[in-house]
Image (cartoon, rainbow, N blue to C red):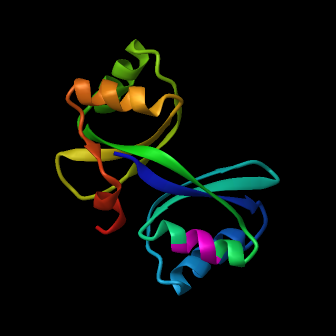
Amino acid sequence: MHVEQISIFIENKFGRLAEVTRILGDAGINIRTLSLADTSDFGILRLIVNDTEKAKSVLKERGFTVSKTEVVAVEIPDRPGGLADILQALDADGINVEYMYAFVERCGENAVMIFRFDETAKAISTLTGKGFQILPGERLYNI
């Protein structure tokens, strides 16, 4: 029920983001979704890609600091209050969302949110118990 995500530490300077995406593209790695958080000096680029191990390898070969973490992909009703319903269920069980970002899988009834929780197993149990669908990584990697 987990999705593998890579996090890349990048200096906040001209061309570094383009370099990362070019390295991945040249290696035939498809970026499925991403999130970028930055400060004035550096950024953390979080990616879900179709080949996590290959992405880690090619980026490390080029001198980037890369780590792998597990996140959770949750299908969310695409309607007003859809995200609020999930966050309320998590809050009621005392589960902290460390960060989240959106993933567009297809046009339709639902959106997909990527979550990093402080208590992943408890979050999955809470969400499935409330009827929310947790998506497997394979569904995201090879769309």
Nearest the eye: 15 or 68? 68
Instruction: Kindly indicate the quadrant of the structure image that contains residue 131.
Output: top left
Nearest the eye: 140 or 52? 52
Nearest the eye: 39 or 74? 74
Seen in the picture, residue 107 relative to 121 is either above or below; the reply is below
Instruction: Kindly indicate the quadrant of the structure image that contains residue 73.
Output: top left
On-image quarter of the N terminus: top left
Seen in the picture, residue 106 relative to 130 is either above or below; the reply is below
**Residue ID at (70%, 78%):** 61
Expressed as whole percent of the image width and height from the top left, the position of residue 59 reads 65, 73
The part of the chain drawn in magenta is 54-58
| 62 sits to left or right of 89 | right
- Verify whether residue 56 appears in magenta: yes
- Tell which residue pokes out farthest to the right in this image: 41
- Tell which residue pokes out farthest to the left in this image: 109
**Residue ID at (32%, 47%):** 112
- Verify whether residue 66 appears in magenta: no
Expressed as whole percent of the image width and height from the top left, the position of residue 72 reads 40, 43
On-image quarter of the C terminus: bottom left
Nearest the eye: 107 or 24? 24
**Residue ID at (24%, 59%):** 106
| 67 sits to left or right of 92 | right
Seen in the picture, residue 44 relative to 99 is either above or below; the reply is below
Expressed as whole percent of the image width and height from the top left, the position of residue 102 reads 41, 48
The dominant secondary structure in magenta is helix
Visible residue check, residue 18: no
| 71 sits to left or right of 80 | right
Visible residue check, residue 28: yes
